Image (spheres, rainbow, N blue to C red):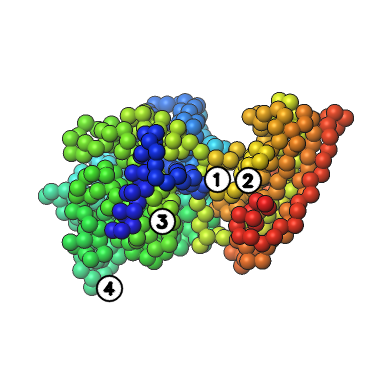
Amino acid sequence: MPRLFAALCLVLLSEISLLGLPAAVGQSLPPKRELRGVWIATVENIDWPSSRTLTPEQQRREYRRMLDEHQRSGINAVFVQVRPASDAFYQSSLEPWSKWLTGTQGKAPTPLYDPLPFLIEEAHNRGMEFHAWFNPYRASLDSVTRRLAPSHPFRQHPEWFLRYSGKLLYNPGLPEVRHYITRVILDVVRRYDIDGVHFDDYFYPYPEGGQVIHDEAAFAQHNPQSLPLADWRRQNVNQLVQTVHDSIRSAKRWVKFGISPFGVWMNQRSHPEGSATAAFQGYEGLYADAREWLRQGWVDYILPQLYWSSTFKVAAYPTLVEWWARNRFERHLYIGHGAYRMLEKSKADTTWHNPRELPRQIRLNRAFPADVSGSVFFSSKSLLSNPLHTTDSLRQHEFRYPALVPAMPWLDAVPPRPARQLTVTASVRANTLTWQPGPAAPDGDAATYYALYRFPEGQTPTPDDPRHLLALVRPQPSRGLAYVDTTARPGLAYAYYLTALDRLHNESRPVHVRTTGRPAEIIVAQAPAPELPGSDSAPQPAPPARPASRPAPRPAASASSGAATKVKVKTKKKRRGGLFRWLFGR
């Protein structure tokens, strides 16, 4: 609890600062690395597409507009539901087209197209990670099987399914079900350029009065250890989680795997390691042992759904953030925020009617900088509606500056090679920077995108201040490796620092150029110094190499050589002095 008290004090100081009152300590820098995500739900057309009757072109326009708005809000990751109910928002030989995409389950889009490559590419073009969101066990929102498409798995294997509370569910106790679900997920992992596989909180169904899960036959047949029923069900879920994790790692080592469980693992009164809450428990109610997944390293991130406010007594937001921070077992912890709660009329948790609640939650997350790595909002529609002007607050305050996605060193800790031939062509209207990709890193990875920092003359460069992060540039065949800085003021000198980042967001050493403020000049940076022994970018044992696409060559400089001064900037020999001196060469 001392950690929680200290965190709440930091949040209070932050709120004092936002009110324009003097604070006892200076404001901390905004985080350079922070995942900022949003769930895009396709089930029942919650977020996208908004209707089952949209044409493919209307679907594409709607998705682009959605991502454009989220990009303006600082979002750098999307969690898109590609399999809401044993159906597909992609071309699949295993499951039918989703009715929420085309209006009829099993009916292909007209004209025919595969939405998933489009969805992924549009996210990547905006610097966003794409996490493919699967609901593993839900087969249908109703149990009227005559409505299912001929290609639905129920048609071939009705013995795989359970009926519960008017829904059709896969039976988690059957080994063949776990094998099939893993096969569906691996089909997407292998065929599409996704960044992550994501599960939501639907494992065994949420209990409802008078309803019974009839898995007696599976329990009798597939329980060699003679476990009690509850432990057997948890083991079934654990086996799926472990199998999916191991399968993804074997197929593509860079694809992340994460789960968004119910926000309470266990209450303290039920288990000494539980949280100081008095709420429904995912461990007992859904047979979802999220703490065990973390302890075993079966997930790369955990994203608990903490949809309660800071003052909700039975499950207070600060209490749960602190609990998950203590129980993340060196995996990433992102917090799921209930943005939709601000649109509810319920009187059960009225603190959500306060426009300062969501910003307060984000600031509390940041009070655990070593443990909480970001926020994800449910859902896209709620954030786009700007409830209580909270989205305005994100844009103006909490997410005003860009952030890099946190790296995952257990997946990849080898940074890419720095860019080469960084050149700035200065003119009265803009500074144009061009460069070429560096060679592949020891693990075979090429740069996936680049971070460009800009510092005015007299400003000490620092690697940790995202307020100087000018742009994130992703190679595109039509544009090459270039950035036009139209915000540079004529006559002022700048230092530009460029780093390369790989798919898992490891950052290279920088190359840099400095302008002099002259109206026309071309400045070429030299290659950076070799890696320092013991530094974060020193060569490390490389994971198995994977294919890497080569970015397009840079375009030629646009300035005329007759009207420009060409300056070759030499890089001074750097002394060892920690990350600050190493990264920015000062």
In x, y percent, where is residue 436? Answer: 73, 45
Q: Which label number is shown at residue 460? A: 2
Looking at the rendered image, the disc whose residue lies closer to the viewer, 2 or 4, is 2
Q: Are marks 4 and 1 in contact (CB under 8 Å)?
A: no
In the image as oriented, which residue stretches furthest toward the bottom?
A: 225
Residue at 34% across, 41% down: 360
Q: Nearer the viewer, mark 1 or mark 3?
A: 1
Contact (Cβ within 8 Å) of mark 1 with mark 2? no
Number of other residues with Cα within 10 Å of mark 2, as a class: few under 14, some 14 to 19, many 20 or more: few
Give the residue at mark 1.
465
Which tag, 1 or 2, sits closer to the chain's start?
Answer: 2
Q: Residues within 10 Å of mark 4 (few under 14, many from 20)?
A: few
Work out whether mark 2 precedes mark 4 in sequence or the reverse, and give the earlier one. 4
Q: Residue at x 41, y 30 (%)?
A: 392
Q: CA distance from mark 3 to mark 4?
A: 39 Å
Sequence-first disc among 3 and 4: 4
Residue receiving disc 4 = 224
Q: Can residue 450 be seen here?
A: no
